[in-house]
Image: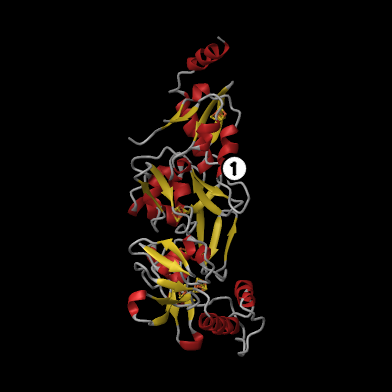
Amino acid sequence: MTKRFLIRPALCIGCRTCELACSLTHQENKKPGRSRIYPIAVGREQWVPIACLQCDDPACVKSCLVDALRLNEELGYIELLQERCIKCRACVAACPFGCSLIDEEQEIIVKCDLCEGNPACARFCPTKALEYK
Amino acid sequence: MKIQINGRWYEAREGEMVLDVLRREGIDVPALCAHEAVEPYGACRLCMVEITHEDWGGWKGNVTSCLYPVEDKLIVQTHTEDIIELRKTVLNLLLARCPNSPEIQKLASEYGIDTTSFVPREDADNCIMCGLCTRVCTQMGFNAISVAGRGYGREIATPLKEAPPDCVGCLACVKICPTHHIQYEDIGTTREIWGRQFELVKCKQCGKALITREFADYLIENRDIPADYFDICDDCKRSGTARDFKKLVHWEEKEEAEEEVSA
Ligand code: SF4
Ligand code: SF4
Ligand code: SF4
Ligand code: SF4
Ligand code: FES
């Protein structure tokens, strides 16, 4: 069975280690990439980490007119084929959760790829608010 | 299957072109008219390589790698003397066509050409006629621009050279153009491209704009995406998602976990 990415916001302490881990894992030309995960403050000492939900009926995939987004069946995530993407931003505008992102620095569109099966955010999260199992 | 490139063996997949393997393996071969979003076209001829095969009885030939499908045990050379000469000729011509293009100047100088030996085009623009813009526009289903005119006067243009009725202002053509020839301008929430003006959809919460109204409407009508998805920008949608989840979270878990740790 494919593993699942579990988010338990109650355990999140807002340390933003996940953001850093994500950013460093997605380096390009020796520059850190934009993080694909964001712990968002929702109250006093309360955070909800938000990343792509890998939807069953993904609006991003439907919005991409050049088929640069597709389900990676083996690893169970929505994959963005960078070489195909023409940066039209349709998916950024269409994702109902705001999880297809513009990396201004690298001038590309990015989204969570579950680190192709070994999510760095989950590995480095000190409280197990993020797990992949 | 495996193919040999410059003496080393690489994995290749059924149905892909030689250029796909070259790009994946980071082997430096110039290719200006190929992009994965569109079908290959074979227009620029820079991606030429030499091919042969042990079963071909010594036959060798030069082909455009963007149009040549891989086959098992194909043997490829990317920088033979002939190939380098061919690329120089192409670059020499391109430099005459687009003498002011920094991309063409850079590529040409990598092949040792700093000035063209032909007469440079007068009033030259930076279009190399690779057709990537028209192909991507067609691929996306808009067909707003095409090649107009013939021979020397050929150019990329809108129908009747007027503001194109089928354009949605998605900028795919701008982003794909290898020589940054196509101009557009965003002023506030108005976009101008190909002589036509578009309104950008403004986020109802913060005002940030991502795509044009026309592009959003196309996606709503043809791609079955709920209209309200486009009302709010990605930043505000992430915050909204977090607030929605807040209601579902069992926040007591936090104290329990902390107790576990301190125990
Ligand atoms: S930005 Fe890239 S991935 Fe997103 S819809 Fe456009 S082409 Fe597809
Ligand atoms: S690393 Fe874990 S605890 Fe820290 S912000 Fe991210 S999800 Fe929260
Ligand atoms: S901006 Fe207009 S012309 Fe350019 S690709 Fe989009 S629809 Fe076609
Ligand atoms: S405008 Fe750019 S993409 Fe279009 S044909 Fe010219 S060089 Fe190619
Ligand atoms: S990339 Fe092959 S001919 Fe242009």
Where B15 falls versus A110 (above or below)? Answer: below
Q: Where is residue B220 shown, x and y percent of the image?
A: 37, 50
Nearer-the-camera pick, B79 or A121: B79
Amino acid type indicated by mark 1: Leu
Q: Residue at x 51, y 31 (%)?
A: A49
Name the residue that disc number 1 marks: A24
Residue A63: x and y in percent read: 39, 51
Residue B172 lies, with reference to residue A43, above or below; the image says below
Judging depth in this view, the residue of B141 and B37 nearest the camera is B37
Residue A38 location, x and y as percent?
A: 54, 35
CB of mark 1 near ligand 2 (< 8 Å): no
Decide: is B133 above or below B227.
below
The quadrant in which residue B50 appears is bottom left
Is B106 placed above or below B10 here? below
Q: Nearer the viewer, residue A49 or B134?
A: A49
Q: Residue at x 54, y 76 (%)?
A: B127
- In what element is the residue under mark 1? helix
Q: Residue at x 40, y 70 (%)?
A: B40
Q: Chain of mark 1?
A: A
Q: Looking at the image, can residue B130 be seen? A: yes
